Amino acid sequence: MTTLNSVLKEILESRGFLVDQDGSFVRGRREGIELHFFPYSRHSPAAMEELTKTAPAIKGKVVLAALVPLAESTLAALPPEVVVWDREAVEHEVGRTRIERLVGEDDHGLIDDLYADDFPLMEEDDQDAGEEERIVPMHMSLQDVVELSTKTVGGFSHRLELVPHYLFSYDVPLYVGEGKIGQREGTLAVNALTKDVQPWDEVPETVTRLDQGHKRLEPLLEEEDASAIARSTVESEHTCERDMITENGQVTMTERVTVHPRLDLGCVRGLGIYYVPIWCVEGTKGVMILNASTGKVLSEDYFRDLL
């Protein structure tokens, strides 16, 4: 069973803090910043008394992470410098860390507010209104996601993100030695955040905008690097061992040969960036990632006995 201490450690490490245990506190240190989390998973007058006495002398921010409801009298007795995270706040931050690992980009979280007085607001996607984007159409609305996630992860936060993919088409001949034996063609998409490669059945139809509010993610991968990944994938996917049968008079011979694509004689062509709409759902039971264009569940991560 995962403890509250390990959950707080995960949250701190997601922002690059070095984490250790300082008495009852989970302490995170980074570039002169110190955060001290006091785990409070069950009612304990002794623990609350310890926090009240020690918090004023602690250097850095102090956070009470409470998984149980706190009475107004208890909250009023806390030192003014103590920040309170309730169960929902802790669950929100756990969901954020899981989603960030899946999509490959940091998102603003409650932990950022602890050490940044002025966090720059994300500008709206329409800042580049003059530049037309190729967005794969959505076939999964917010209502669809709410209905699905409520039954599974108990979703309470639903965020739509546009994930950039470099798209490549290829048409290459297959050779055994110096002899051509066939041809292969297809389409590959390279995720510009995670470098994952997926075959696409075809080049999709696109739209230039979505009515649903969303956040567009910027590529972390250069097109040249994505092209190298695509070429390497074509090479590996279409290289194989095969038995070749030949007849010479009364003798039939079977020879094991290697079939490989000749990229130098073929074509791997970049088609530009296509944005795939992805639903990121945080819930009381876990997190879920869904492809809004296909409706496919890409990932489900349940908390189970996390808290």
Image (cartoon, rainbow, N blue to C red):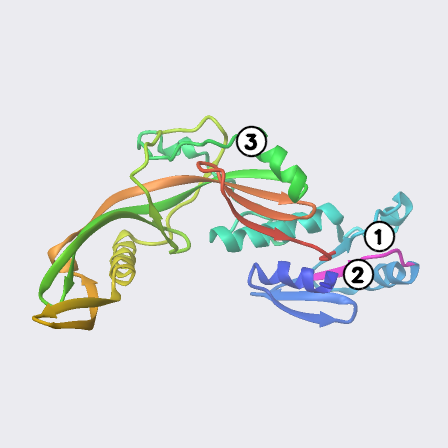
Do tag 2 and tag 1 residues touch (Cβ < 8 Å)? yes
Q: Which residue occupies 61% across, 37% down? A: 148
Q: Which mark is residue 55?
A: 2
Decide: is 214 above or below 307. above
Label 2 crowd bin: few (<14), some (14–19), many (20+), radius 10 Å: many
Q: Is residue 111 visible?
A: no
The numbered mark, 2 or 3, whose residue comes first in the sequence reads 2
Residue topped by disc 3 = 142
Residue topped by disc 1 = 78
Look at the image and give the residue range highlighted in magenta. Answer: 36-44
Image quarter (top left, top right, bottom left or bottom right) of the N terminus: bottom right
Q: Amino acid at mark 3?
A: Leu
Q: Amino acid at mark 2?
A: Ala
Between 109 and 298, the residue placed more toward the observer is 298
* Secondary structure beneath label 1: loop
Residue 247, given in percent of the width and then of the height, sits at 12, 68
Q: Amino acid at mark 1?
A: Leu
Q: Which residue occupies 48% across, 50% down? A: 103
